[in-house]
Amino acid sequence: MKTNYYIILIVLMISCGEKSKTEKEPEVDIQGAVEIIETALDTLPKSVHLDFTKVIANIQTKKLPQFEDTNFDSFNDEGDYDEVDVNALKLDQIYPDFNSEGHNYRAISIYTIPVNTNFHTIVTTVKHGDNEMESVLVNYNAEGNVLAHQVVAYDEIAEGMSRTVSRISENKVMVNRIFWSNIREVEEIEYEIRGDGTIKKIDTKRLNDSFKDFALINGVLKDLKLDWVQTKTNLITTLEHPHNPNEKIVVIPEVVNEGEQYFDLNSYIVIADKRSGKIMNKHFESYQSNQWVSDAIELRKIIIDTALYRINEKIDAFGIRVNYHGMSRVNPYLNKTLSLFIKSGDSLKKVLHNYSVMNYGGEWDGDCDGEFVQKRKTLVPGTKKSDGYFNFMVNNKIVETKDYKDNAGECRTEKSFHFKNTILEFNGKKYVETNVESFSYPEYHPQKTESLQIDNFDIAHSFELNGYKIVSGNYIPEEGKRFASDTETETNWGDRLLMLDASNEIVFKSQGVGDAYLFEPHFYKSDISNKVIIICQKAYEYPFGGEIFVLENGSLKHIGPLDIEGSDEETYLTEIVEINEVEDTLVFALKSEEVIINPGSEDTLKTNKNVIYVYLNNELVLKMN
C-alpha cells in the first residue's frame, strides 16, 4: 500500500506541474518534493538484474581449481550459515519445491568462482531437511537467468551410504560419486563447461573397474589424506616392485592447478606393502621442481620402469618415466624423462632427476621440406664409482632426418646416424652428466693371404694380422657325415674361426656354428687401443647376426654372439654396426631404424630405440629401452 501511495503522489506532482501557464503558479517546496520522490524510488522493488548484480558483488570468490566437498562436518552450527538471496539466485527453478511447505529447503552457503568471463558461476549449498545437503554449481547470464546447473557435492547422514565430491576448473567439472556397501565404490563423471555456459557430460567410468589395484590405491590415498577427485586419475599407475614381489610401487599425481589445456601436478611416489597396502616408503615433490607440468607441451603418460638400475653392490634403483608431447604440427616435439629412486629409511631418495632419455624435434613446412633430430639414450651401469655409487655409461643414438623435394617434385628422405657417449656420475646428492673420453672402432681391411693351406680344412677367408693368420672355414667332413670325427663332434661342427702363429700352428679354434652359407670375418680397430675386434658375419640366404672375437696382446677370445640384424635383408650387421669403448666398456650399436632380434629363429622385429649390446665384466649383454 505504501508503494502505491508514493506512486500516486508522484503522478499528482507531475500533473500539477502541467497547469496552464496563464494561471498563477503557486510556490512549491522543490527540495521537499525531491526528497519524497527519492524516498519513493528507494522503496520500489528493485529489478532482478539489480538484485543479482548485488549478490555477485557481495559474495566470496574462490580460486580454481576448486575442490568441492561441502558436507555436514563443514558447519558447526547455524551461525556458520551464510545469508543467501534465494529469489535473486532463482533457486526455485533448480528446486521446484524449494518454497513448498514441508520440503524444508534452506540455502546455507554461497560463493562464486571465475570459470568464464561470458557468464557467472555460483556454487550454492542447499540443506534439504535435517539429513541431506548438496552443493550445486549454477551458471547465470548477466541478467541472472539460469543457463545450466550441476550437483557438485552431496552428503547425507541418515544412512551414510553415499557422498559426492568434485573438482571444478575453468572448463570442466570432475565429479566423484562415492558409494559404500561391502567395499567403497567410486564413479567418476566428467562434465564440460562450455563457452555459452551450458554443461555437457563427456565421460563416465567406474574407478573400481578401471584400476586392478583399486583397493591398494584407495588405501594409499587415505594414508596421504587425499581423495580420488584431487588426483589426475588417468595418470595414476602401479606396478609390482621389480626387486621385491611383496611390494607395489604406486604413483599418485595430485592436481594443484588446472585449466583448459594445462595442469600442474604434485607427485607422490610410494612403495606399499602388497597385501596390507601400508606405505613403506614415500617421496613427495611439488610441481615447481618435478616438472610435472602440462601446457603447450602436454604431459601424456607416467610409466614405472622395471629395468634393473644397479647403484652399488647392495642397492638397486627403480625408475619413473614421464612422456611429453608437443601440440604443434609444423614444430613437432617429443620428450621422455627418467628419474631414479632408492629406498632411504621410510623415504625414497631421488638420485636421478628428470633426465631426458628421448628427445625429438624439428621444423617443416607442413608439406615435405623439413629437418628433424631424434636422440635416444640407453643407460648402462659401469664398474667405476663416484661417491659410493656406480657410474652409468650413457649411449646416445642421434638420428638426423632431412626431407626435401627432388627435381621431379617427389618427397625424399635422407637419414644419418651417429652415436655419442657420456657418463652419469653421483655427486653425493644426485647423478650429473659429464663428458668422457670414448673412442670408436672403425672397420679396416687387413691383408689377405692366398697360399695358406691347413690339413683337412676348407679355408673360406684368410688374413694376415699382427704376425698371426686369422682364418675362417670348416673341417672337411667324412663321407656320409656332417662333421670330421677327429676334430669335431655332434655339437661342435661346421664353420669356425682359427688363429695361426708365425709357424702356422693353430693357437685358437672357436666353436663351430654349423653349416652356414657365410661366416666371414670383419675387422675393427682404433688408433687409441691395441685391441682388434673381429665380427664374423653369419648368413644363409639371409643374414642372421655375428660372432664377436677380441684380439689383444697376441690372445684371441670369443666374447659372444650378436643375435641382431637390421630390418633390411640386403644390409648386413657388419655394415651398420658402430663400436665404441667407454671406460673399459665395449658398446655395439646399429645404425638402423628397426632391428630384428634373434634373426633366423624368433625373428622379432623392433623399433630401434637405441638397442645395444654391451660387453662389461666379461659378459656380453643386450640392452633395450
Image: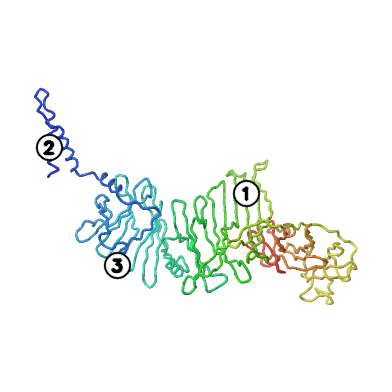
SS for callout 3: loop
From what the image shows, is residue 88 above or below residue 513?
Answer: above
Q: Mark 2 points at which residue?
A: 9
Residue that appears at 52% across and 72% down? 247
Q: Are circles 1 and 2 on residues that touch, CB within 8 Å?
A: no
Q: Locate the N terminus and report the quarter of the image it occupies.
A: top left
Q: Which of 393 and 194 is in front in this view?
A: 393
Residue at the spot of label 3: 157
Q: In this view, does 252 lie above or below 139?
A: below
Kindly tell me whether residue 310 is visible in this rendering: no
Which picture quadrant has residue 564? bottom right
Which sits earlier in the primary sequence, circle 1 or circle 2? Answer: 2
Q: State the image coordinates of residue 251 (x, y, percent, origin top left).
A: 50, 64
Rendered location of residue 95, percent (x, y):
26, 56
Q: What residue type is labelled 2?
A: Leu
Q: In this view, does 557 lie to the left or right of 598?
A: right
**Which residue type carries mark 1?**
Phe
Tell me the distance, in whole angstroms, between the alpha carbons under discs 1 and 2. 83 Å
Instruction: Please name whichever residue, 215 or 148, is drawn nearer the observer in this view of the structure.
Output: 215
54 shown above or below 435? above
Mark 1, residue position: 372
Which residue is at 11% across, 27% downward? 19
The front one of 37 and 246 is 37
